[in-house]
């Protein structure tokens, strides 16, 4: 039963200096119209196949969905309202960037059923925003938050620490400002310097200097202290919220809920039955395209996969938005078949992203499928990366800082 729907909008007004996401700067009106047409077709196919009947959360992300402008965004959301019973949808999020959202857009989206906005603020320091290559100012971000708050209190913002020229004083001021502005959810990310980005080149050329890893870790810790003191709790590695404002959609990803991603560059995690329905209506391309994207066997399965032991299917759609829009197929789509054991290990790994960790019953379930998990859990406990917390096994503070070590140990078994 698919309960979470993600739509990917791969366009931004301009490209940020650190970005390596599946997006591009696009101000071509015809290209955006064509993309929305193709995405609408995918939504209609999914709806006709009965794949959208149990949706509880919707997330339109990117890229910058609000860069589409009100007309395209409204028609997309209107189509969703015809395809999904929004009465059953408890959370409907749209990502926005400060330069492309205004009060009119907020009013229309709110009227159509959107009840959560996630705004890419990144910093309240104009010098840091400039170093990130963002095209908005701190004042634009404040205005965007205030525009959304005219209709909806459920506002999340993203903040990035470790930017060139960023000081601890500027960082603290920004995190405190988020609280003053009354946002309900904050996602905190360390700056990732990805090869090939303008920021990586500027750092290599010695033009800018980011804070050290230690300074960045101190900023993350300081953010936790400030946000906790204000009453928010860290419910996931990067996510802080006041009680009741935790992201339901993202929680679905970390708790093994089946989800469908539509659009170029999106990801899906499907049961075998829903995967069969997707194939029947051609959601991820023609039968030939799908069969050429299928692996001969899966590196994450204990046995060669036959039709009977496929338990779950992971689809990473091609990021080629131009081909997506023209219906020319999905040449780079990647399909992975997981058996029950691989799927259980993946759920376990994702579960350790959450502060409450993983219920013991789930670990018992994994043990039935993969006895070696006992040794892995013992090792993680000895290394003080996880600990028993009531009825759960939860990551320790050290485990959160060294999360990759937990994920690698578990994924090593898969
Ligand atoms: S707004 Fe986000 S997706 Fe768009 S270029 Fe910047 S970082 Fe990338």
Image (cartoon, rainbow, N blue to C red):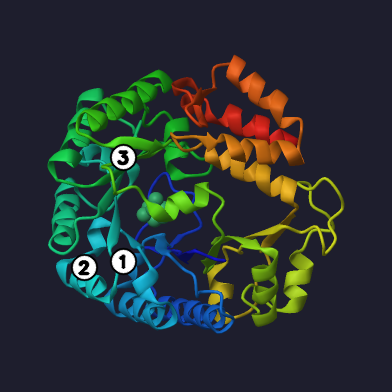
- Secondary element at tag 1: helix
Disc on res. 66: 1
Task: Identify the image quadrant of the C terminus.
Answer: top right
Disc on res. 106: 2
Lower sequence index among marks 2 and 1:
1
Which residue is more in the foreground, 304 or 189? 304
Residue 401 in picture, x, y percent from top left: 47, 25
Q: CA distance from mark 2 to mark 1?
A: 10 Å
Classed neighbour count for the residue bearing mark 2: other residues with Cα under 10 Å, few (<14), some (14–19), many (≥20): many
Q: CA distance from mark 2 to mark 3?
A: 29 Å
Is residue 414 visible in the rendered image? The answer is no
Residue 214 in picture, x, y percent from top left: 40, 18
Classed neighbour count for the residue bearing mark 3: other residues with Cα under 10 Å, few (<14), some (14–19), many (≥20): some
Looking at the image, residue 361 sits to the left or right of residue 4; the answer is right
Q: Which residue is mark 3?
A: 131
Is residue 1 visible in the rendered image? The answer is yes
User: Ligand 1 within 8 A of label 1's CB?
Assistant: no
Query: Residue shown at 75%/77% (left/top)?
Result: 287
Disc on res. 166: none
Q: Is residue 255 above or below residue 103?
A: above
Q: Cβ–Cβ below 8 Å for labels 2 and 3?
A: no
Lower sequence index among marks 3 and 1:
1
Residue 160 in picture, x, y percent from top left: 34, 38
Which residue is more in the foreground, 128 or 170? 170
């Amino acid at each position: 039963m698919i309960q979470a729907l993600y739509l990917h909008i791969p366009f931004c007004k301009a490209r940020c200096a650190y970005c390596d996401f599946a997006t591009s700067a696009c101000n071509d009106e015809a290209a955006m119209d064509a993309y929305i047409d193709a995405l609408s077709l995918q939504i209609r196919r999914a709806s006709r196949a009965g794949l959208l009947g149990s949706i509880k959360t919707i997330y339109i992300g990117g890229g910058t969905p609000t860069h589409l402008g009100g007309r395209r965004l409204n028609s997309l959301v209107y189509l969703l309202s015809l395809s999904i019973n929004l009465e059953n949808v408890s959370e409907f999020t749209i990502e926005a960037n400060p330069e492309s959202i205004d009060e009119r857009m907020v009013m229309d989206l709110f009227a159509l059923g959107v009840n959560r906005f996630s705004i890419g603020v990144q910093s309240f320091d104009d010098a840091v925003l400039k170093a990130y290559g963002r095209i908005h100012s701190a004042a634009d971000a404040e205005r965007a938050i205030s525009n959304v708050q005219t209709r909806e209190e459920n506002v999340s913002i993203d903040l990035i620490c470790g930017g060139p020229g960023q000081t601890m004083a500027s960082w603290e001021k920004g995190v405190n400002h988020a609280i003053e502005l009354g946002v309900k959810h904050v996602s905190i990310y360390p700056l990732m310097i990805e090869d090939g980005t303008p920021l990586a080149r500027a750092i290599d050329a010695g033009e800018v200097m980011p804070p050290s890893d230690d300074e960045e870790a101190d900023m993350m810790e300081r953010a936790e202290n400030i946000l906790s003191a204000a009453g928010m709790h860290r419910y996931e590695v990067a996510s802080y919220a006041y009680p009741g404002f935790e992201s339901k959609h993202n929680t679905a990803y970390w708790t093994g809920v089946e989800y469908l991603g539509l659009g170029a560059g999106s990801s899906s995690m499907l049961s075998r039955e829903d995967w069969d329905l997707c194939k029947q209506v051609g959601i991820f391309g023609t039968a030939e395209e799908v069969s050429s994207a299928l692996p001969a066997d899966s590196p994450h399965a204990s046995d060669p996969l036959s039709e009977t032991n496929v338990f779950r299917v992971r689809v990473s759609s091609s990021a080629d938005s131009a081909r997506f829009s023209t219906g020319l197929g999905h040449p780079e789509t990647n399909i992975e078949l997981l058996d029950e054991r691989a799927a259980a290990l993946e759920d376990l790994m994702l579960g350790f992203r959450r502060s409450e960790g993983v219920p013991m019953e789930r670990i018992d379930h994994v043990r039935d499928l993969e006895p070696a998990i006992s040794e892995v859990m013992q090792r993680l406990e000895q290394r003080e990366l996880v600990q028993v917390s009531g009825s759960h096994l939860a990551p320790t503070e050290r485990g959160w800082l060294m999360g990759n070590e937990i994920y690698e140990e578990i994924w090593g078994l898969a």
